[in-house]
Image (spheres, grey):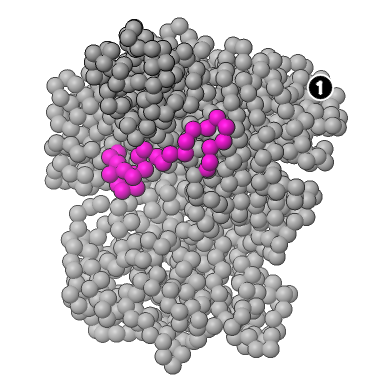
Amino acid sequence: MRPFVYQRASDAPSAIQNLATATAANNVLTEASAQPLAGGTTLIDLMKLDVMRPKAVVDINPLAASWSNVSLDDDNLRLGALARMSDVAANPEIQQHYPVIADTLKLAASPQLRNMASLGGNVLQRTRCSYFRDVSYHNCNKRNPGSGCAALEGFNRSHAVLGTSEQCIATYPGDFAQALMALDATVEITGRSGVRKIRFSDLHKRPGESPQAETTLSPGELISAFLIPGPWPRSVYLKVRDRQSYEFALASAAVALDLQDEVMRDARIALGGVAAVPWRAREAEAILKGQKFDDALIDRAADAAFADARPHRHNVFKVALGKRVISRALHQAATMEI
Amino acid sequence: MSITAPEPKANMGQPIPRYDAAAKVTGKAQYAADVPLVNPAYACLVTSSIAKGRIDGFDMTAAKQVRGVIDIVTHENAEQLKEAKLFSNGGYAGTTIQPLKSADVAHTGQIVAVVVAETFEAAQQAAYAMKVNYTAAMPSATFDSAGTTSAPAKGQLAQFKEDPKVGDFAKAFNDAEIKVSAAYETPPQHHNPMELFATSCVWLGDSLTIYEPSQYVYGLKNGVAEQLGIDADKVRVINAYVGGAFGSKGSMTPRTAIIASIARRLGRPVKLVATRAQGFTIATFRAETRHEIQIGARRDGHLTALRHESWEVSSRPDPYAVGGTKTTTRLYACPNIESRVSIVRADRNTPGFMRSPPEVPYMFALESAMDELAVALNMDPVELRRVNDTAKEPISGKPYTSRSLMACYDQGARAFEWEKRSPQPKSMTEGDWLIGYGCATSCYPTQMAPAAARVRLQRDGRVRVEIAGQEIGNGAYTVIGQAAAEKLGVPVEKVSVFIGDSDLPPAPVAGGSNSTASTCSTVIKVCEQVRQKLFEALTSNESLTNEAKGTVGMGQTPSTPSASNDRPLDLERAFDALGVSVVEEYGEWKPEGAPMDSFQAMYKGQVRMVGGSEMKDKIAYAFGAEFVEVRVNKWTHEIRVPRLVGAFAAGHIMNPRTARSQLMGGLIWGMSSALHEATELDERYARYVNDNLADYLVPVNADVSDVDVILVAEQDDHINPAGVKGIGELGNVGTNAAVCNAIFHATGQRLRKLPVRLEKLEI
């Protein structure tokens, strides 16, 4: 790890001020010279690997008093960005009314990490691409813009098949984000000029020509909360991985259904482990919406979700697996006892 | 799964708790890197990002500007150390590739510079700031890569003695009623012990003390002395505990002499803790292997022909091979056998021992092929093993000293409820899950090596045992203490055990599962010397009756009487007769058949291992039978292992509690070897991609629900005084085959290439 200045924020304005001042010169937020520290489970890890080299780390944990509340009223869920993953996963109301949220949190990482990690930090978790995480590879467009992508022709079993570009095929690694995608969550962002709200689906940027730019956050902006309409009692998260716990998804699906008399009045599908960013399978949803729950229809929807998939040498299997995961998750949701 | 210690059966010791358990779980146990040093400098390694080529130069400007940097050592300014010879060719080292010797790069992750600083943080920061300029050449990564070369192992490697052969394989296979031919493959794997590769070197005058996790303190001491060109008596290696090793800490790595040399040059202690990723390339690993197996059999299951040909990857300069055909050609009765092992050289670091080095890959091939044969014969796989069980190995007809393979199968099958298996693949299901049962044979050679020990007995019954063995998690402290307590007839609480220090009497490498057999046999012998001394004192005292001499107890009666002086002694009378308060004996022990130079070699840190298939008139192996239940999700193809059952027979079990833990860990490792562990190569660069514990998968608790270990009683009086067969490497042999055999039973699909990943299933 390289030396850095540690600043402990006393309140939101001072944290934002510190972050904004230090990062003003840098328009790529993830490489900004000042980084907020919440649970630290990604940031500290990447600093140890020399991937992230902030000059200053602003500890925002003192804001937890106001930014870690969880409240459910008028069918809307508000999750403070500094709430810990384990606390939210264990919340009985969330388990009952938004099981997909509790599932995505419970199936992520390990208990130790979930006890530390904040929700806001979790959605900003950076990719697990081995070539990104090892600085001895020069060719990583995310780390060294314009240097190429070692994963394209390298070992790319865990890489994405959706939403990638010729510049980057790294997978977005998170689980919780898929629940937020599926449920049309809103992100509350606090910055110098106050609070703004955006759709969660507008938070992450596809790699395109600039994989180094991962989000639409501006310097000095912090996620302060997530707002999720609902409830979605008929919702599940299915995560398929190489071992049963403490492992990232090979393919996963967050699914929510509004099912009445076997008709899907609404169907929501978001995919993890297969895409460059949190991924909503809108084409699949369109096929299902208003239709009767039916195996052939579900197969058609799953096919549609992966119609634009672009696999590489070692991740061809993710297309077939991803489709099966959609199908199984929909079946699980449809047969839930609620 | 029961968590209580197993009850001892016939020929088993007491299941006492581990001697070091409380120290370990409370964090009191001091590992090498925990030892506090006075005014240390901290070293960080810079390793190469290319696998083949030359270093053109370094840009150290930024690194040198880091405050606290003391020295940056490269091939341009390093002390030229003496060459290190390969362990498997009679030397001490795991590789002959010596970094910091020239500008040449022989593999990825080779040490190219060492940064030394006042703090760990400064050393690391400067290491990050180092720029190394290379001229890279195209490396050959693995099998089938352009530029690799292949040659028979025989003749290249002292450790590999023969390609076993008997009868006329070609004719017998041609004539066989039933034939199986198949090719198998195992991946590279890394040991990944929890404890990283750490080294601290402290000079006091011309004496060097090294704190380093090692499976062989005596080998390391002598190896480092040779490289530094100093007297081995001036080098001391200390490690009270080793935080996992699995073979990776058995032979010397280049780092130790390098750090010692830097500490000498700086005139202050230097401490290195290499990173997890560096551990993948600065030490050894299990190389990838390929196998072709042909089996011919009669319709009744009897083998008539067996051929096992294998290829293993090694580095350019070093002809390392594990060569498991010495085991696989001797396991089952068969009159016509042929085998061959070849070494394929690539631009990689030199591979080395990893838990059950020959048996894990080679038994995967044989035990998978045996299952394929059982399918071809429409025969129960357990019965196929029974039909081909043998009391004599088929290559030269030597008898097994003991062999309880079928007792293991029978007891294991009963516990597993194997009879509930319906033989047809895909015939057992539950909901979305296809269920499969598989089994395989486990075996490991029984090996011993010379050792020495010092035992001190006090009048109050307290005992001090000194032997330079190693506690690598194997329970060495515990069983050595038990051996002494039993022999001297004192409670085990009165015995203090000192190991992990090369100033103690020499013991062999804690590898090849020889440790318990060698150290306990030696301690038993030296305890006998102590008893002899006391007994002589008593018997020369004519005022005592014979009854008093022989039967007045000093505690419990030794449980394994074997020498004439094994009767209980009256300690106080014996010490009175001697006129002293302490008796101390030093003794050496070597196994039957050990070469003439065994003891001289022992003091030089060279092992003369005896046993397995390499004894003159007999062959000694421990055996086991392993049963696995897998469940394969028919939609997602996820593979689950709800049950593992292993039954093992290994002569005298010193301690059923520690034995069960060893075997349980082995079974889980074996499963991991099939389903999880594989080091992925980026063949373009000959680099390891998943060189960290997040991406190099090992099982978590959720991956295996129920592990049942059955200790099968066995007595073997033809191996060593302790009657012990090693078990450290028994549990994880064959498990990989049992898993794949179970997957075949569940799905009808045969997987011949490890690791199994869900995308390989096409159901």
- Picture coordinates of residue A189, whole percent (x, y): 32, 80
Q: At which x and y percent is residue B322?
A: 54, 27
Q: Kindly state the secondary structure of the residue where label 1 is placed.
A: helix
Q: Amino acid at mark 1?
A: Ala
Q: Give the magenta part as a residue range.
A: B6-31
Q: Is residue A297 above or below residue B554?
A: below
A152 relative position to B105: left or right:
right
Residue drawn at (77%, 36%), measured in percent from left and top?
B383
Numbered disc total: 1
Closer to us: B210 or A192? B210
Task: Reply yes or no: does residue B22 show up in magenta.
Answer: yes
Q: Please state the horizontal and vertical placement of residue B713, each as a whole percent of the image.
A: 60, 33
Residue B518 x, y percent position in the rendering? 45, 22
Q: Residue at x 50, y 59 (%)?
A: A245
Q: Nearest the camera: B20 or A122?
A: B20
Q: Quadrant of residue B176?
A: top right
Observer-nearest residue: B563 or B657? B563
For the point 17% across and 75% down, which residue is it?
A: A10
Q: Is residue B568 visible?
A: yes
According to the picture, the residue beneath numbered tag 1 turns out to be B172
- What is the quadrant of residue B297 in the picture? top right
Q: Magenta segment, principal secondary structure? A: loop
Residue B220 appears in the rendering: no
Q: Residue at x 24, y 45 (%)?
A: B124
